Structure formats: C-alpha cells, structure tokens
Amino acid sequence: MKKSLASMCLSAVLTVAFSYHAVAADLPEIEKSGTLKVATEDDYAPFNFMNNGQADGFNKDMLEELRKYAKFHVDQSILPWTGLLAAVSTGQYDMALTGAVITDERLKVFDFTPPWASAQHYFVKRAGDTSLNTIADLSGKKVGLQAGSALLARLPELKAMLEKTGGKLGPVVEYPSYPEAYADLANKRLDYVINVVISVNDLAKAKPKVFAKGLAVSGPGYMAWPIPKNSPQLLAYMTKFMNHMKETGKLAELQKKMVWRNL
C-alpha cells in the first residue's frame, strides 16, 4: 500500500510522539518489576522476519541470548515499523530490539548500543534490468522506500550524487513495509528500491531471478538497538551484554550466520 492520507496522518502522530520526553523504565525499575519490555518487528529480513510461521533472523537469535544473560524476564512485542520507535520513545516499551539505523535525528531521542551491522544504503532493481547500471541511470526514476525509515532521512545523499551527474531525484513512494515495495518493484510500478546493504544482499540471494543488487547510494552507516535517553543504566547494561557477546565470540557467530545467509 502506497503512502495515503492515513499514513500521512500516522507520520504526524509519530512526529508528535517523538516530541515528548521518554518515560521508559530504567534498569532499577526493570529489575524491580522483573520484566524488560522490548519492541520488535517481523518483516525486515534478515534482522526480524517470519519463516514458516516462526520468528527468525539476527535479532531473534540475539533476543534468545539476551534471555539467557539477563536475570529478569524479557517480554517481546511485535509492532509495525511505522509505530515502533514512537512507542519506545513514549515509554510503552523500554527499548527497541530491531535493525535501527543510527541517525542524527534519532540521536536526539535515543542513545544506542554498540553497533552490530553495516547500514550503508544500496539500490535494488529488477533482475535483468540493464537500464540501471550507474548512479546517473537513476535520474528521474521512481524509487520506493519504507515510511519513517532512515533511508528517507539520507535520501538527500542520493539527490546530491545525482545532481553531480546532471540528473535529479525522481518520484519517491513511501511504503509501510519493504515486502510491499518489493512487490511493486517486481510488478514494474517502481524502477528501484533503496534498502540497507545486508537486506539488499538477502533479497538478491533469496530471489535472484526477480531482483538484483545495485550500487551504494549513501555513505557508511550502522545499525544498533535504540534506548530512550532517560535510561542510562539500561544502556550501560545492554552495552555490557554486547561486550559479553563479543568476548564470547557469540556475536561474531551470529553475524557470520547473517552475512553467510546474505552472500
């Protein structure tokens, strides 16, 4: 479903939500209640997705490790991406356990755990489309992205790249989730879609007869878990957890599993 009046209203709601100071619980309150409330999504492969009706992905594996590490219960709620960060920022959840790209705008609301994946942006096109081989070829073409994503925030980078070639950014269509954008790309309602490199690799590997990886359309970027700024002790705890995962080699093992699945 393309961006509609309803989704534009949702964007307005999210803007208002982000303007409020976060009231999520910090670590002492979490330990006292015995529960950490985390928000995740289920349609952003290979980070969070459903596989034959079962949760799968890098963050699903990380959640399992966190449950082994923590002395409190970790309660997971699955939300649509368009409302996930707003729900965390307003204190409905203590943190987001999903593939969130670190951006300047998000740093105004959240602190982030140590990053665990590259989030450089690439374009994906239809397999066999020989018309999109360079950045200049994207000039004026219709592009699809997820609404409320960091991909939109960094779209000016592609705009600048195109202008250097004498081109211009074409129409931009926003979607609630990437599967819908990919469906429109496959059906020629879009010319290309922009996503983070790991997701583009995953898509091209899973459906090589339908989609193909293009070129980088942004500078470097990184993914991490966002935690509200009023939860410094929770941030320190999650940083210790990430360090534990690194020191035991488990983080590298899960990263290798994710990358292997995407190359």
Image (tube, rainbow, N blue to C red):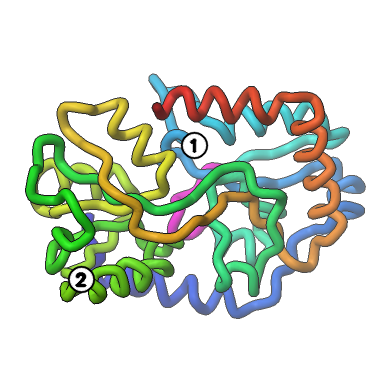
Q: Which residue is mark 2?
A: 165
Above or below 16: residue 23: above
| Residue 28 placement, left or right of 77 | right
Residue sitting at x 49%, y 50%:
119
| Residue 241 placement, left or right of 171 | right
What is the crowding at mark 2: few (fewer than 14 residues within 10 Å), some, or many (at least 20)?
few
Residue 220 position, x and y percent, is 49, 56
Of the 4 image quadrants, the one containing the N terminus is bottom left
For badge 2, the amino acid type reads Thr
User: Which numbered circle lies on residue 101?
Assistant: none
Q: Nearer the viewer, residue 142 or 157?
A: 157
Above or below 31: residue 111: below
Residue 73 position, x and y percent, is 78, 35
Residue sitting at x 22%, y 63%:
173
In the image, which residues are magenta? 77-84
Of the 4 image quadrants, the one containing the C terminus is top left
Q: CA distance from mark 2 to mark 1?
A: 36 Å
Q: From this viewpoint, which residue is outermost toward the front?
A: 165
Q: Are marks 2 and 1 in contact (CB under 8 Å)?
A: no
Question: What count of labels does the image hold?
Answer: 2
What is the crowding at mark 1: few (fewer than 14 residues within 10 Å), some, or many (at least 20)?
many
